[in-house]
Image (cartoon, rainbow, N blue to C red):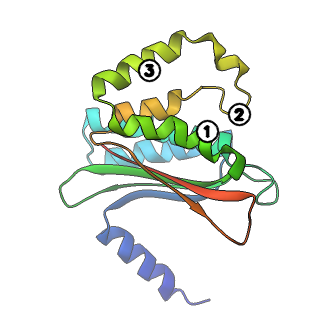
Amino acid sequence: MNLSHFADFCEQAVKDGILFYYTGEFSQNVIGAMSDTLKQRLDAAGVSGPARRKLFSAFVEMSQNIMHYANAAVHAGGRIGALAIGRNGDNKYYIVCGNPVRCEHVERIRGKVEPLRSMTVDEIKAAYREQLRNDAHDQDAISRGAGLGFLTVARESSEPIEYQIVYRSADADYAEFYLRAAI
């Protein structure tokens, strides 16, 4: 094993402003441990209260997104994903996640995320309140939130959220979904 690769990774992460990074299996226990670690990391980095709240809120929603959409069959029984939080050169924070999704869910996801990119903050807040009153959440066997998570991430973001869906030819059943929010 060449440990210099790890040193290179750490050096690049510092240059890129990465405050927190995780890749691997997502479970409720892992998310709980990451939550505690993230709170400590944000404190140590001196992140302000409002930014910390927004980052943490987006973190919770993105983690749940990975739990709900990353199919357990993809990687030997685990819901695999990645999540990173960083600060760019303008001292703005960002949070990004990625996970595999079944191709049959891609249009559903796109249909929930794409409209959010052109909505105003007030429109996002109104859509959020409307979804809270929607009793059909319980009937949604896939996400159980009927888009509340994406609405929450969009509400916390200071810019339109970004997303990308990447199809890999090696596995026609799955695509990779990436979501980014600026805080």
Name the N-terminal-most of marks 3 and 1: 1
Residue type pointed to by label 1: Arg
Where 87 sits versus 43, above or below?
Answer: below
Q: Assess whether mark 2 and mark 1 are in contact (beta carbons under 8 angstroms).
A: yes
Residue that label 1 marks: 108
Residue type pointed to by label 3: Tyr
- Most foreground residue, 118 or 178: 118
SS at badge 3:
helix
Disc 3 from disc 1: Cα separation: 18 Å
Q: Position of residue 137 (x, y in %)?
A: 64, 19
Q: Position of residue 119 (x, y in %)?
A: 33, 31
Which numbered circle lies on residue 142? 2
Instruction: Confirm whether residue 114 shows in the render.
Output: yes
Give the foreground label among 3 and 1: 1
Question: In the rendered view, does 169 fall on the left or right side of 77?
Answer: left
Residue that label 3 marks: 128
SS at badge 1:
helix
At 50% from the left and 84% from the top, the residue drawn is 5
The local crowd at label 1, few if under 14, some if 14 to 19, many if 20 or more residues have their Cα within 10 Å, is few
Name the N-terminal-most of marks 1 and 2: 1
Q: Quadrant of residue 27?
A: top right
Question: In the rendered view, does 159 fall on the left or right side of 129?
Answer: left
- Most foreground residue, 178 or 85: 178
At 74% from the left and 28% from the top, the residue drawn is 141
Q: Position of residue 47 (x, y in %)?
A: 27, 44
In the image, farthest residue toward the left: 90
Q: Assess whether mark 1 and mark 3 are in contact (beta carbons under 8 angstroms).
A: no
Which numbered circle lies on residue 53? none
Q: Position of residue 10 (x, y in %)?
A: 42, 74
Where 21 sits versus 124, above or below?
Answer: below
Residue type pointed to by label 2: Ile
- Most foreground residue, 2 or 143: 143
